[in-house]
């Protein structure tokens, strides 16, 4: 005699059965509040610490292991050279972590001629920055330079009449900390001409 076989359930039926089953949790686990994510337990996080993780995939496609060469470019090669040349890509030989070719973008033909004279110094400075022979060759191509943010001009000094107007407007506020904060805000807005 053959034993009867149990009916087989589909994946969807199994998933539905698991969802309907009561969760077996201890009393302590049921009463304890959900645990906060680790980031929240440590307090506020500096945005600079997060940018490395966010930019690593995009920079990795261009051969940059990190943003160090980009963020420290003026320090590595000097302000004069960084004004007309910027790194665009680093190409490593297959399977190696050293001996790369650095591709630069230069702003104009005269800059390319000047760059050719400084290539040995550039290679030496980059390798000194990284601490090993990371770059052995530099190639340059002429093209438009990335747009750099211009530093903002300092606001004009606050006139006596504008300061008096801000003081009159916040005079009725009783809370001293709030009054001081609004005074500072008012003076800043007056300086910016708003």
Image (cartoon, helix red, strand yellow):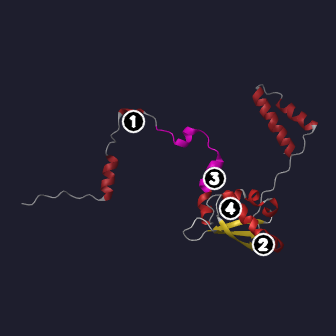
In front of the other: 78 or 153: 78
Mark closer to the chain start, 2 or 3: 3
Tell me the distance, in whole angstroms, between the alpha carbons under discs 3 and 4: 24 Å
Mark closer to the chain start, 4 or 1: 1
- Residue 4 percent coordinates (x, y): 13, 58
Residue tagged by mark 4? 127
- Residue 35 percent coordinates (x, y): 48, 38
Check disc 2 and report its element: helix, strand or loop: helix
Residue 182, relative to residue 112: is it above or below?
above
- Write the residue at 30% across / 50% down: 17
In front of the other: 187 or 82: 82
Q: Quadrant of the C terminus?
A: top right
Magenta highlight range? 34-54
User: Quarter of the image holding residue 172?
Assistant: top right
- Write the residue at 86% across / 32% down: 167
Check disc 1 and report its element: helix, strand or loop: helix
Other residues around mark 1 within 10 Å, as few (<14) / some (14–19) / many (≥20): few
Outermost residue to the top: 174
Residue tagged by mark 3? 51
Mark closer to the chain start, 2 or 4: 2
């Amino acid at each position: 005699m053959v034993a009867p076989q149990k009916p087989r359930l589909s994946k969807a039926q199994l998933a539905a059965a698991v969802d309907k089953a009561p969760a077996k949790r201890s009393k302590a686990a049921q009463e304890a509040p959900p645990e906060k994510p680790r980031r929240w337990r440590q307090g506020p996080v500096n945005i600079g610490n997060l940018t490395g993780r966010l930019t690593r995939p995009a920079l990795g496609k261009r051969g940059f292991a990190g943003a160090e060469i980009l963020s420290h470019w003026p320090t590595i090669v000097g302000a004069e050279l960084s004004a007309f040349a910027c790194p665009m890509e680093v190409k490593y030989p297959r399977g190696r972590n050293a001996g790369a070719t650095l591709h630069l973008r230069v702003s104009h033909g005269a800059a390319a001629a000047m760059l050719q004279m400084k290539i040995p110094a550039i290679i030496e400075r980059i390798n000194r920055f990284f601490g090993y022979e990371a770059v052995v060759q530099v190639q340059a191509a002429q093209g438009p330079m990335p747009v750099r943010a211009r530093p903002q001009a300092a606001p004009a000094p606050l006139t006596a009449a504008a300061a008096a107007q801000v003081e009159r407007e916040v005079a009725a506020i009783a809370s001293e900390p709030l009054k001081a904060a609004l005074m500072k805000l008012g003076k800043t807005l007056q300086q910016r001409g708003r």
